[in-house]
Image (tube, rainbow, N blue to C red):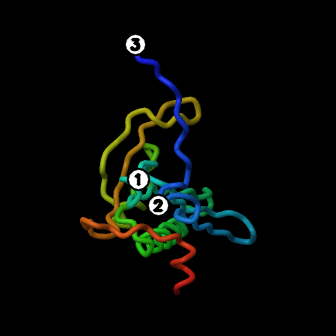
Amino acid sequence: MRRLLPTRPRWRGALPGNGPRFHPWFVAEENERLLGYASSAPFRTRAAYRWIVETGIYLSPDASGRGVGRSLVSALLDLLERQGYVAAIGAIALPIPASVALHEKLGFTYAGTYRGVDFKQGRWLDVGLWQKELAPRTSEPQEPLAFDSVIASE
């Protein structure tokens, strides 16, 4: 039998297009109170996935129905597109009809479901995946840009 040895873990952020400078968050506040946020994160850690980004959204209950979520996600998608990402994946714990509706209004389309992968409040939930194309696929894509460099060039 061959002996198996542990290896060094992958260094987070060491790949191009990975790390905190590449995954912006937008926050909405009102009277110094958090209304919500839209976040982005690496879709996967392997280099082949670096042009795809995962997005998330949180809204406080009193922010729902006021356009806050749409503003946050729209601003996030605009910046991600300017950074050079080609697609965004929204992962939604099911069932959350308002989140599904928001993503679909913003051009996301249903892409699949992970079964029973989200454990919340004592139960396992499915997670639906919605995908939005941000740019055409090319055979030699440019590396995603750090969001601070995109904002600085405006």
Which disc, if any, is residue 1? 3
Quadrant of the image occupied by residue 130:
bottom left
Measured along the vertical axis of the image, is residue 80 above or below residue 11? Answer: below
Could you classify mark 3 by the number of other residues whose Cα lies within 10 Å: few (under 14), some (14-19), or many (20 or more)?
few
Q: Position of residue 127 (x, y in %)?
A: 42, 42
- Residue type (three-letter) at the residue carrying disc 2: Pro
Which disc, if any, is residue 47? 1
- The reply to whether dot 2 and dot 3 touch (C-beta < 8 Å) is no
Left or right? Give the position of 20 relative to 134. right
Q: Which residue, given by chain and number where applicable, does mark 2 sit on? A: 16
- Residue type (three-letter) at the residue carrying disc 3: Met
Measured along the vertical axis of the image, is residue 127 above or below residue 152? Answer: above
Q: Residue at x 50, y 73 (%)?
A: 75
Q: Residue at x 54, y 77 (%)?
A: 149
Q: Nearer the viewer, residue 124 or 143?
A: 143
- Where disc 1 sits, the SS reads helix
- Where disc 3 sits, the SS reads loop
Question: Of the residues tagged 2 and 3, which is closer to the observer?
Answer: 3
Distance between mark 1 and mark 2 Cα atoms:
7 Å
